[in-house]
Amino acid sequence: VRPWLLPAAGGVLLAIVGVLAVASLDRDEPTPSARADALTRELRCPDCQGLSVADSPTESAQTIRAEVDELIAGGATDDEVRAHFVARYGEWILLAPSAPLFWVIPLAVVIAALAALAVWLARRPAPSATATSPLSIEERRRLHEEAEALDA
Amino acid sequence: MRRLRWLLVPILVVPLAWLLLSGFDRDPRAIASPLIGRPAPAWSVETLDGERLSADDLAGRPYLVNFWASWCIPACVDEHPVLASAHERHGDELAVVGVLYQDTPTDAEGFLARYGDAGYPHLVDEDGSLAIDFGVTGPPETFFVDADGIVRARQWGPLTADSMAEQLASIGVGS
């Protein structure tokens, strides 16, 4: 295995993901209710255990959904809607972290680990010839002698 | 050099283990409030008595906002006397405001009749938007606002006499 192969493959994969992400930005403008649906799937229901606002029937989830609708109707962008709730609850209210660092770190760790593995495999010396060669006659004789001595 | 390589293991494992273990003595729901150090949300809400009360009415006075519910048992029952005694003890120096969290006025009045009504106002947060504005995750939760209208502390969970004294000190209300 060539040491550069895996990091290179990782780089190509990243590039593909990047191109897809940019391409997806060029879609048609979604309707306000579709935007609210998407946003409520990103927001955490404050009094549930790990459920999104969209998935929860609680009063606070309903209140947040109503506020999202209201903010969108008032002309807020998606980022402004997110910021509205982050200002009250902190980043916690977002089910997925917004800082790109949180997404890059695990990916970088995996790529670095694969690269290290590739380097290690490439550098590892071939299994030495002496280690696998059969015992010499002298060694066999000694082994036999010592076994006899143990039996005695 | 080869030997030193084994140092890598503790160098990587110890901080990681510390990071993971440090979470055990923390309550995952007790998240830090982004409101601390910032102006309290503006509000104007009807009270249980049918009067309208707003943050502006309390301007210039430190106050605490306690989100509670009649169904919040035993935590809200436990802290109820602590709030009542703070209200009695500090009088005009401190405004105490309760907020019904996902509760009906009838149930809240029943709670006050049973456990004692200290006489401070309770806001009826009908649509729950005041709780959202304060970033409340569940009752009881109490916010401490100083005389300049800045949120200085938040108590997540029931107040005790000690935590009440500590939080009041942060908004300049002494014993």
Image: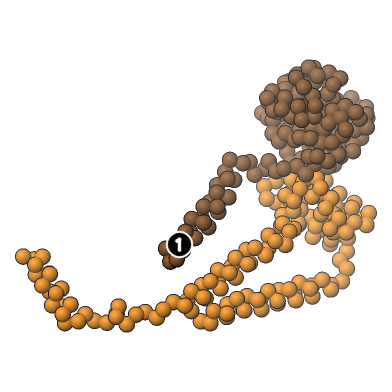
Q: The chain drawn orange is chain what?
A: A
Given residues B12 and B32, the one toward you in this image is B12
Residue furthest to the left: A152
Residue A117 point in image, percent of width and height = 51, 72
- Image-based side of B125 in relation to B21, left or right: right
- Quadrant showing the C terminus of chain A: bottom left
Quarter assignment of residue B60? top right
Relative to B70, say whether B91 is above or below.
above
Q: Amino acid at mark 1?
A: Leu
Q: Chain B: give its colour.
A: brown
Query: Is any atom of residue B122 visible in this view?
Result: no
Residue B100 point in image, percent of width and height = 80, 32
Residue drawn at (9%, 67%) of the image: A149
Residue drawn at (68%, 63%) of the image: A103
| Residue that carries the numbered disc 1 in the rendered image | B4
Residue drawn at (80%, 39%) of the image: B37
